[in-house]
Image (cartoon, rainbow, N blue to C red):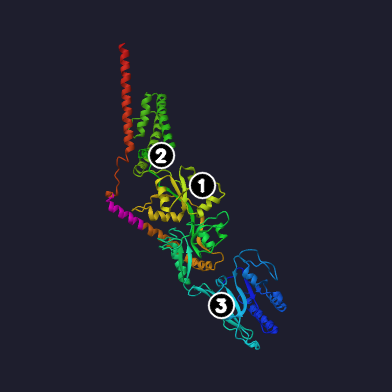
Amino acid sequence: MVVTQAAVPLGITRSQPPAAGALVQQQEDVVSLLGEVAGGRLAACHPIILTHNITASPRLHTILIGLQQSMANAFLTYDVETYLNDSPPSLPLLRHRPPKSDDWFPGATRYFVCCTGSSSSLAINTLEEEPSILASYNTLYVTHNSYHDPQDNRSWSLHLLSNCPFCRSGEPEVILRNKWSPWRGLQHHTDLFPDLFSDCNGHVFRAVTLNFPPFSHYSSGNSTHPLAMEDCLDKRIVDSVAQVHNFTYEVYEPADGLWGYQVDNGSFTGVLGEVERNIKDFSLDLSVTAEREVVIDFTVGYHWEPLTFVTSKPQPLPQWLALVRPYQAYAWLSFLLLLAAAGPTYWLLQKLSGSSHSFLGSILHMYGAMLTQGRRWPSSSAVRVFSASWLFFCLVVTVSYVGNLTAFLTVPALSPTVDSLEELVDSNFVWGINDFGAADYQLFKTSKVPLYQEIFRGLTFCPSLVECVQQALDERFAFISFQTYLRDAIAMHFIDKSGDTQVYLAKESFFPADTAYAMQKGSPMKRVFDGILKRLLGGGFVSKWMSTLIEEHTLATRRKAAAASALSGETEAVLEGNQLSLTLHHLQGVFYIYAVGLLLSALTFTCELILFGLHNGGNKG
């Protein structure tokens, strides 16, 4: 076990010895044992002695100070009763006070050694009646041999007891770890601090989560009845850890139905709060944030999960505008300006060269050339050069227009998409999140970023995942949530039989955070989970499982959609020779132009009749 910052409390209490000389000798023997233990496996640790009324025994005081001076590391001594009744200890007896904290040594792997001063059988009964001590780990208890002869020092020995959190069918108990005597030393070559979590002997852990596929997914259960877990990423990961370390687990919902956010008094609600208050042993997937890491320990992250949002898919633009879409508005304006200037320029060049051509005829001449109509061009060199450049210009414009027109007629153009929070704020969309008090709500509520503050001011709430995505499908609504969560929701509920999504997932994401499991503060199970998670991540299992789950959900949804279509009698259009036939819908724009042309022609004819009538009436007068 790697020790980053460790503490070794060595606790000594006194029994009722038959003589003061024997007591001093026994105390010296105990200190010798403690020095042997601390100088072996725990040599790199920061040793601490817990004693009972050390000032009442000057000889023991002298021995302990000698042991302290002989060790390379700092040496602290505390009263054992203070240790058991006060956390952290209020009175250091020999050296400086440790940091004032609910956790004596934050981040430390603690090895405890304490001498009960009683017989082994009595010590076991006493320790097993104290739940807080029984649930501890890496603890070594030194007890007297109850059968030794007070007159024979060679019969004097100590029994080394150890807590085993999961030995008795997964329940804690105190077992005899080794024996020691001043004449033989340790009786067995066994590790006094073995890995107590390599085999949990079927212990049942209590986990907490909410429905969050593909991470956690269940079909039934609540805060009082275990959840019926479906196949999901967290189940596969925790099952792997449970198989290696031989434990089982039950999963529950939090009592308040929330993921967990920080309230004004600093505590957390929901999933996070139940782990923080030691109601549950660990949670399933949670986003790692700085505020949460203060009250719980996270395992290594196993998935990078940012926030994003879904909206309705872009809608097709009016098909009658397909005729003008090959060019943007400024390009059309440039063409019209050149066309308007080409006719007068052509007429002026002809006039200067001595040719006679009407002004209106020159304009129609240039227009006909753009439509590839044949013309007899004048013999003047200046006019021919201008005409050649105009014909080349018309060729490029016409060919590029015709080449793109087919695509714009057959493939409908779509309205612009919203892909970032900045675009969302500037759009006419309403936005919202699930009302589960998760990390997304905490982000928008507490952030000092102006963009996030503006999002929070306009934030609305929707009741459930499917209803939120359906609202995004039906209305001008953007549903903000976690990216993989949304991808899986779309795969499970919003994919048609062809595999096309019915909603639009924004291209940009924000607030990326690791997903990990939350453990009680200082829980040794963090190390257990970290070891298996690193192996799963290194082997690529987590990413593979994630992709597989989403693919399975997509295929299942497509099969349901296909079955529903078959039952409703829907038929698919069959395209012969893989060719698409254009319909009136595709060509409606050109019919509109033709109708406008007929209308203008009729108006022109009417105007000519009126003018002709007025002219004839004036001649008769």
Residues at circles 1 and 3 in contact by the CB criterion of under 8 Å: no
Distance from label 2 to label 1 (Cα)? 37 Å
Q: Name the residue nearer the viewer: 110 or 214.
A: 110
Quadrant of the image for the N terminus?
Answer: bottom right
Residue at mark 1: 455
**For the point 45% across and 66% down, which residue is it?**
250
| Residue neighbourhood size for the residue with mark 1, other residues' Cα within 10 Å, grouped as few (<14), some (14–19), many (≥20) | some
Give the residue drawn at x 36%, y 26%.
361
Of 593 and 509, nearer the camera is 509
Is 560 magenta? The answer is: yes
Q: Tell me which label, 3 or 2, sits earlier in the chain.
A: 3
Under mark 3, the amino acid is Asn
Sequence-first tag of 2 and 1: 2
- Mark 3: secondary structure: helix
In terms of image quadrants, where is residue 118? bottom right
Q: Which residues are magenta?
A: 556-572
Snapshot quadrant of residue 400: top left
